[in-house]
Image (tube, rainbow, N blue to C red):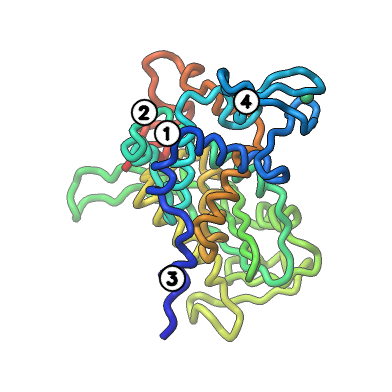
Amino acid sequence: MPLHFLKTAKARTLSVKRVMRMTEEEAVAEFQKLRWPDTNGEPVCPHCDCPRCYNIRTRKIFKCSACRKTFSVTSGTIFHSAKLELRDYLGVIALFVNAVKGISALQISRDIGISYKAAFVLLHKLRESIDHARNGLKLGGEVEIDGAYYGGHVRPPNTGREGKRPDAKTAKTRKQCVLTMVARGGATVPVVVRSENTEEVLAATAKHLLPDTKVYADEHGSYDALHARYEMHRINHRLKYAEGDVSTNQAESFHSRMRRGEIGQYHRISGRLLHRYAFEMAYRSDRRRVDNGATYTELGQMALSHPVSREWKGYWQKRAPGIDKPPGVSGGAAATGGAC
Ligand SMILES: [Zn+2]
């Protein structure tokens, strides 16, 4: 029996060991290749796009021959004003890529030896660059659609097994639905909505599906309205999970990955940031059959082509002293997806 792709050497083209053994000069060269792939790492001025720049080695910056402005390899990117060694950033990207069910900020902080706050912001910058790169995706061909609820943890009362269960109504109102569209053989697009209802389903599909798409859904009533717009195929989950090629198994498998991330890594995901975690898991899902070196390069390029993050730059400085959790989140830092 042939080995599963993930067990073969072709799937392992990156190791954290190789990244963390880099000298700082090698890390700078790697950063340059990720930032300027078209010129094989030769700097291009971010101010005027001029390719003639010279290196001021003593200050680790470049100077443009045309506009005379200076810049560094991280200027104008999410790593702008980088405070860590560049090798550590590459190490975080490598650990992030290798963690197929997600990785918590606390684990990154322990693995790399950086503060929890630095790890938390860095991971969110990576999620923002994934969100930015994939937000406008349009799907066509055969697309599966399905929703599942996340977040909104309600602590059960301390009344033992025989006691009253958590109020389902309260739990439901705090949860949000991740409505997921998966193109067979293509990309995954998650959309966070208040609930799986007709209005939200119509809005999400109008934004992300091409007109001639074949849509596969379960028997949930919110998908009935799609019959007027698309060729629909429905599977009744009360009877079976698949009939021929009619199923939503790929959408279910995205939700399975997302649920494992929520339970095993992030524990409690803030509703404010749920869409970022959903985009992260969609990206992981779409790259599950790609070697880790290629994903590392792609994510590094996404991060270095993303502008300075308005949301995460100086994040902890913007927070009031003594407050260790983002706005709109209860339950401390754990509620932000940093636990474990
Ligand atoms: Zn210039």
Taking depth in this image into account, of 264 and 19 the one nearest to the observer is 19
* Foreground disc of the pair 4, 1: 4
Q: Which mark is residue 226?
A: none
Residue shown at the point (52%, 21%) measured from the top left? 314
Is residue 313 visible in the rendered image? The answer is: yes
Which of 147/260 is in front? Answer: 260
The amino acid type of the residue labelled 3 equals Thr
Q: Quadrant of residue 34?
A: top right
CA distance for labels 4 and 2: 24 Å
The answer to the question of whether label 1 and label 2 lie on touching residues, with beta carbons closer than 8 A, is: yes
In the rendered image, which residue does mark 4 sit on? Answer: 72
Picture residue at 53% right of the left edge, 80% below the top: 242
Q: Mark 2 points at which residue?
A: 115
Q: Position of residue 124 (x, y in %)?
A: 51, 37
Q: Which mark is residue 8?
A: 3
Element type at mark 4: loop
Q: What residue type is labelled 4?
A: Ser
Whether label 3 touches label 1, CB < 8 Å = no
How far is the residue under mark 3 from the one under mark 1?
31 Å
Q: Nearer the viewer, mark 4 or mark 2?
A: 4
Neighbour tally class for label 1: few under 14, some 14-19, many 20 plus, Cα within 10 Å: many
Image quarter in which the N terminus is found: bottom left
- Does residue 35 appear to the left or right of 275 in the view shown? right
Q: Which of marks 4 and 2 is nearer the N terminus?
A: 4
Label 2–label 3 contact, CB within 8 A? no
Give the label on residue 119, or none.
1
Q: Where is residue 238 in the image (x, y as percent from the top left)?
A: 48, 76
